Amino acid sequence: MSNNTDHSGKTMRKPLILVPTGSRERDGLDYQVMGTKYLVPLVSVSNCDILMVPTCFGSDAIDTYLDLVDGVFLSGASTNIDPTLYGQEWLTPDQSQDKDRDNFNIALIPKALNKGLPFFGVCRGLQEYNIAHGGDLYQALHDTEGMMDHREKDPDASLEECYGPNHKVTLVPNTWLADVIGQTEFMVNSLHGQGVKTLGQGLSALAHAPDGLVEAASNPAFAQFNLGVQWHPEWMTAHNPVYTKIFKAFGDAARQYAAQRG
Ligand SMILES: N[C@@H](CCC(=O)NCCCC(=O)O)C(=O)O
């Protein structure tokens, strides 16, 4: 079922995906923002509708939001997660933080998973998913012996270059993600300074970079689609067969959730 019909051909509503925003300050004013590139594949490849919600008013409304939706998507963002949330001192004061987004998303993740909602986190979204499971992060991979520099090669380069192929990813064989993707190695983009150091309790690595960094993880205790990836499959998704398969699988899981709850 990749379109919005059930097995009898009856038209169903599109699944609704919760997308929490992040904060951005400009000219002394605060904004709640979301990059359009994250929304495009949710609509055009996953075939879902979107419910964007603010993260700056605390976590009281999370249950209300989760009752409305069929899946949860956490985007990337240039801000770093507050390291006190994973028991470390702040080693990157040159990078901005977004504590509202941290608190909202880290409260949201276990609620969404326990409710059976499909979950997909990208880049910062994977990092939040790991912290929500009690894991921690390398705060600066590029300053960590034995690890590659996972940041974009040249921040002044064109977007096409920044989000273009950067390094290989190798999938752990015989996992559900390897089945979805159908190949064990492929190239991904890479635009992050931080990364999973210790995986949180219950999480399994599904893919690694050449330096061993966890590039994809999932919690097998939850039967529904739940996945975090460190790269950016939302970039030009329709032109990349691997990225497309992941967004389609997420959309199908959300459709299944929507069909089950009627
Ligand atoms: N600050 C973290 C998160 C990296 C991340 O999510 N980057 C996204 C870049 C902008 C975008 O494409 O939305 C880190 O550096 O590891």
Image (cartoon, rainbow, N blue to C red):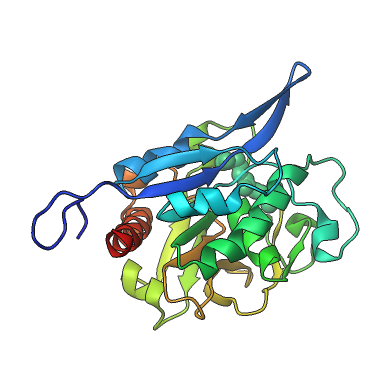
The single residue placed furthest to the right in the displayed view is 89
Position of 107 with respect to 255 (left or right) is right
Q: Quadrant of residue 176?
A: bottom left
Query: Is 70 placed above or below 227 here?
Result: above
The single residue placed furthest to the top in the displayed view is 27
Q: Residue at point 65% right, 41% down?
A: 55
For residue 61, say whether it is visible.
yes
Q: Residue at point 59% right, 61% down?
A: 109
State the residue in front, 34 or 157: 34
Q: Position of residue 133 (x, y in %)?
A: 67, 70
In the rendered image, which quarter contains the N terminus? bottom left
The single residue placed furthest to the left in the displayed view is 8
Q: Position of residue 216 (x, y in %)?
A: 53, 67
In the rendered image, which quarter contains the C terminus? bottom left
For residue 152, say whether it is visible.
no
Query: Is 181 placed above or below 17 here?
Result: below
